[in-house]
Amino acid sequence: MKILKFGGTSVGSVKNMSLVKDIINTSEKKIVVLSAMSGTTNTLVAVNTAIKNNEIAVAESIISSLSDNYLKVTEQLYQKAEYKELAINYITKVIMQLQSLATKPTSNHTEYQVLAQGELLSTHLFYYFLKEHQINAALLPALDFMRLDHFGEPDNFYIKKNLSQILDSKNEVEIYITQGFITRDYMGEISNLQRGGSDYTATIIGAALDVEEVQIWTDIDGFHNNDPRFVANTHTISHLSFEEAAELAYFGAKILHPQTVIPVRNKNIPVRLKNTMQPEAPGTLIDSSIHGEGIKAIAAKDGITAIKIKSARMLLAHGFLKKVFDIFDYYQTPIDMITTSEIAVSLTIDNPTHLESICHELEKIAAIEIETNRSIVCLVGHNIVNHHETPNLFQILQDVNVRMISYGGSNNNISLLINTNDKLETLRKLNRYVFEPAEVF
Ligand code: ADP
Ligand code: ASP
Ligand code: MG
C-alpha cells in the first residue's frame, strides 16, 4: 500500500485533476489524500473573517462566487448528466451549510467547519470524476478516522484502529480517496492540522498503516536547495535524510508542512516528493540514508519574535536559565533559537500568543527587550558544522544585520536571525556564497 497526496494546484483545475487521475490509475492499492482546490482555503478564511467582522453580506457574496466557480468546474469536469447532477447536489449542500454558518455566532467550532468544506468539495468532485471513468474507487471520510488527542497531537491508536476497520469493510477497492487537513479533536469536534496540513495527513495515515511509501505530489519537481519563490536558479535535491527534511520543513520550506516527517521518521517509511505536472521527473526522496556533506539547502521562516533577557547580576547564577525556561514551559511556548552572553540571554519564539504574559513574568527576574518582524534563515545539510566550505556563508555578515547566530547546536543546522525586510537579500546572497562560490571568490 502507498499513500499519494496531491496538493491544491494538483487538484486546482480540470486539466490537473485529469493528470492526477492518470497518475493514480494503476493496479496498486493506494490511499489518495487530496487538498482543497487551490485558492479555496484562502476563500474560506475570508468567509470566516467576514463573519467575525459581522459583515454577513460580504460573507454571502464570497460564498456565492465560490458556488459559481465550483459550478463552472462541474460543467467542464463531467461528460455525463448523472455525474454532473451528483456534483451539483453536493456543491449545493456545502453552499447551504456555509450560508447557514454565516448567520450563526462565530466560534472556533464554526470556523473549523467552514474551513473543512474545501477538502470535502475537492474529494467529492474527484471521486465522482473517477466513477465517471469507471475507476474502482471509494471515499474514506477523514472525519471518521482522523482524531487529535488532548495535546493536539494525532491520536495514533484511534486513527489506526478506525482506519483499518474502514479499509477492511471496503477491501475490494483499489483506490481510496480521503481528505487531507481535516480531523476531529479529542472532543469529536471538527478541527484541522493547520495550513498546509494535508502533507501531515498523508504521513500520519502512512505511519498508521505501515505503508511502503508516502508520496507528496505538488507543483514543483521536488525539494529545491533554496526557496524558488524568492531566489532564481534553484535546483532539485535528489535526496534528503529525515533529519535534513525535518529541519527544513520546521524552518519554513513551504513545500512540506512543518510536521510532515515526524510520523514516518521512526518507522523508516520513505517520503517521495513528485511533480504532478512532470511525473517523469525523479523529484526528491526523503529517507534514513545520508547522501553528501555540507550545506544542502536554505529555508526561511517569518513571524519570529526575539526576546532579549538581561540580568547584570545573576545570569550565570545557578537556576537563572531554569527560571526563564520554566516561564516558557508554563505558557507552552517553544523556543527556536537561543544565544547567551555573560549578562544576557536572547531567544526566539514563533508563536506570540502568550507573549504579554511571558514578558510580565520575565520582567520579575530581568530587564527585557522585544524585537518583532524577524525571520530565521536556516542552512541545513549533513555535518555542515565541520565542512570546509561552510565558512563561505559568513560573507553574509558584511551584507545584512545578523541579529543572532546559532552554530553547533546540531551538526546539521546553522540558523541566522535577521530582520524580515532583509530576507530576500539574505537568501539571494547566501545562494551565491554557498551554492555558487566560484563566482564570488
Ligand atoms: P501544495 O499545494 O501542493 O501543498 P505548496 O504550495 O504547499 O504546494 O508547496 C509547493 C511550493 O512550495 C512550491 O510551488 C514552491 O513555491 C514552494 N517552496 C518553498 N520552498 C521550497 C523548496 N525549498 N523547494 C521546493 N518548493 C519550495
Ligand atoms: N487546504 C489546506 C490549506 O490550504 C491544507 C493543504 O492544502 O494542505 O492550507
Ligand atoms: Mg502544501
Image (cartoon, rainbow, N blue to C red):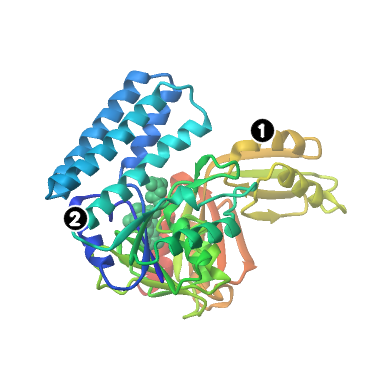
Q: Quadrant of the N terminus?
A: bottom left
For marks 2 and 1, give the one nearer the viewer. 2
- Circles 2 and 1 in contact, beta carbons < 8 Å: no
| Image disc number at residue 356 | 1
Label 2 residue SS: helix
Left or right position of 438 against 201: left
How far apart are the alpha carbons under marks 2 and 1? 55 Å
Disc 2: CA contacts within 10 A as few (<14), some (14-19) or many (>=20)? some
Which of disc 1 and disc 2 is earlier in sequence? 2
x and y, in percent, of residue 39 in the image? 31, 42
Is residue 311 or residue 196 the one in the foreground? 196
Task: Tell me if residue 294 comes above or below residue 202 in the rendering.
Answer: below
Label number found at residue 132: 2
Residue found at x 22% / y 53% = 129
Q: Is residue 112 above or below residue 194?
A: above
Q: From this viewpoint, is residue 227 visible? A: no
The residue positioned farthest toward the right in the image shown: 318
Amino acid, disc 2: Glu
Query: Callout 1: 10 Å neighbours few (<14), some, many (20+)?
Result: few
Residue 198, picture quadrant? bottom left
Image coords of residue 438 (percent x, y): 37, 75
Left or right of 349 in this view: 220: left
